[in-house]
Amino acid sequence: MKQKLFLMLLAGMFSAIHAQQLSREQLRKRLFFPDFLQEVQDAARRPAANAYYRLDSIVYMDYDATSGSYTTSQKDHFGWYIKRNVSYIPYSWDPSANAYTHNQEWLYSYVNIQSDDLSEVLVRYDLGSGIVDYFRLRHQYDSQGRLTDYFGDYYDYSTGQIENYDNDHFVYSGNNTKPDWDYYKLYDASQSAYIDYARVHYISYNSNGILEQAQIDLWDSSSSSWVPAMKLTRTFSGGDIVSEVEQNWDDTSSSWVNSERETYSYSTSGNQKTIEMVAQSWNSTSGSWENNDKVITVININNNKVLSIENYSWDSGSWLGQVKWDYTYSGNIVRLEYTEWDNTAGTWKSGPTYMGEYAYNINIPATDLLIPKKYTGLYAFYDEISSDGLSWEDIRKDPFPYALNTVSHYYRNDPSQPWELRRTDFYYYNNTLDVENPQMLAHKLYPNPTKGSVRIHVQAGTFEFRLYDMTGKMIFTGHYSNNEEIHLPELEKGIYPYQVITSEGVISGKIVHR
């Protein structure tokens, strides 16, 4: 849960942090950065060297039970250059125009096109008055490929420009791959410099590389010194976490005082392992811990698959259920059922009211699949719980053995009613490394080789043209009509990848510049 929330902090999504006003929740998310970063990097680099199936698009279709047919709803399209995800565009269907439309796009650049290290993420929006660069995430790495700086730049409505906002500077010791320090700074336009605001000291890690201790200090400009703010302490037993305690610094007593705690207990029966986590808050008046929430997770030890997740909240001296997720696995099908708590009966309802059915393509093993940065990258954005009730955390708990084929969403208002199919998500892949959509090859770009300009003809009639350098960075873009002359920027001799984006899809190719 913490990692999922931290995604929003890193991406700075639409609710910028005001200078000198970081909330306690925003601060505490920074404590968990090393665990989060490692998990993200592992996911981003999961595909084997010979992976070549790429997720091209996800089409979301609403189902009408009366007519027994699907209607187009939305689409996510992922652009690629060889094995690197270079763009993500979410489309909405416009029935009046009978076409897909979009008002945002995510563009990814890399330090080297052979590397998974992002150099820049640029998110562009059409705000009605034209397309603007809404926010930009820049990265710098050291000689060992470790992230040393992350810069967040955001659109300023007052100036109409993208402006510097914040910077994370990470410090490592020796050959460690996890940072020892994270210095968080906010940009001060009056000084044209990034000014210290907070720092996190990742004090120690256990033998498995999981963070054990961390402390946040805040910069006090009046005394020009760091002052303590928060502290995290974890304990482990046999590799399992036993407790996680957060404390705040009390200026009055000049000491650490308890704030929040999570305790974990484990039990095993046959091939099932049950993990119970209880979250508590410290009551300074009574000097004791008070219950808040509880999560009970059951996993299959043999294959490490989640079997169920139950969520409870503490109310008037007893635990009340909130929601329960049950997973079942059969061949290439995974079913996820959502059951609510019956407050009157004081128990779970007799059956689920939501079911997600995940069907996998057994011809594409996960090891052969290239997954977009949208789904594994540091800069993705996910709601706490999506509209269909499925959280990103839940998805990650299922180690996909194959590529997803379809996800069907069923609902019912009462467990006694039959299931009603509402929507199906269709996943499309391709294994052509140089062309986004093989069916879109009916286009013409000429002359090629070129000395400075080209013309393009596509079936759709109008298109956006994007040109990249060999690192994957976009160096030129523009909107054109069929056969309109495109004047390229000054280029050195060489080969340049390009994309042609139309209402029907995305085409990729290469231009040879003489």
Image: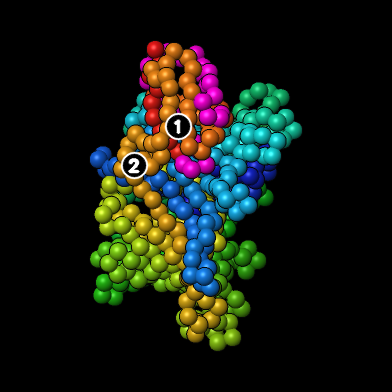
What whole-number distance in Å separates the C-alpha atoms at marks 1 and 2? 25 Å
Three-letter code, disc 1: Gln
What residue is pinned by disc 2?
45
Q: Is residue 150 above or below residue 26?
A: above
Q: Earlier in the sequence, mark 1 or mark 2?
A: 2
Task: Judge depth for marks 1 and 2 and give the one in front.
Answer: 1
Quadrant assignment for the C terminus = top left
Q: Is residue 308 above or below residue 473?
A: below
What residue is pinned by disc 1?
499
Place of residue 23 in the rendered image (x, y in percent of width and height, measured from the top left): 64, 49
Horizontal side, residue 439 vs residue 98: left or right? left
Q: Is residue 110 above or below residue 446?
A: below
**Residue at 45% across, 71% down:** 355
Extent of the magenta region: 480-505
**Could you say which is closer to the camera, residue 452 or residue 335?**
452
Place of residue 501 in the rendered image (x, y in percent of width and height, measured from the top left): 49, 36
